[in-house]
Image (tube, rainbow, N blue to C red):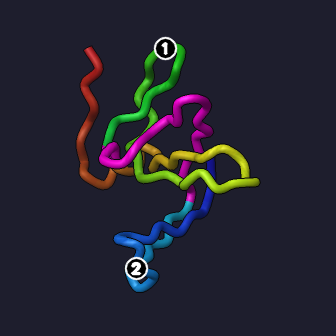
Amino acid sequence: MNENIDVTYFNDPARTAHFVGQMAILGDNPPFSADGDSGSLVWTATGYQPVGLLLGGSQAVPGASLPHSFASPLQPILDRLKVTLVTQ
């Protein structure tokens, strides 16, 4: 956690947003996320605890590491909206 990332929308550098304190999630085979998954709830593999909202992902680039997905930590979002997640 605590990754700082720039997300470019619609392949337009003028539409780039900077995000601080995000979670990086390494995909394996298949990747963790795909186009259209933004906003999905991310939870832990064990215990199924909600931890974030999917923000986006990197593309696979030849010679680079596997693609990553990125999620915004969930608790600051819940705090900002003044809501509580019901898990039962």
x 64%, y 56%: residue: 61
Residue 47 picture location, percent across and down = 49, 14
Which quadrant of the rendered structure holds the C terminus? top left
Q: Nearer the viewer, residue 85 or 38?
A: 38
Which residue in the protein does label 1 denote?
47
Q: Nearer the viewer, residue 57 or 44?
A: 57
x 29%, y 20%: residue: 87
User: In the displayed structure, does residue 81 sit left or right of residue 22?
Assistant: left
Q: Which residues are magenta?
A: 21-39
Find out whether residue 84 is within the magenta segment. Answer: no
Q: CA distance from mark 1 to mark 2?
A: 39 Å
Residue 44 picture location, percent across and down = 50, 24
- For mark 2, does the 10 Å Cα neighbourhood hold few (<14), some (14 to 19), or many (20 or more) residues? few
Which disc number belongs to residue 12? 2
Q: Secondary structure at mark 2?
A: loop
Q: Residue furthest right?
A: 63
Find out whether residue 35 is within the magenta segment. Answer: yes
Q: Amino acid at mark 1?
A: Gly
Q: Is disc 1 in contact with disc 2, using a CB cutoff of under 8 Å? A: no
Residue 50 picture location, percent across and down = 41, 29
Q: Amino acid at mark 2?
A: Asp
Q: Earlier in the sequence, mark 1 or mark 2?
A: 2
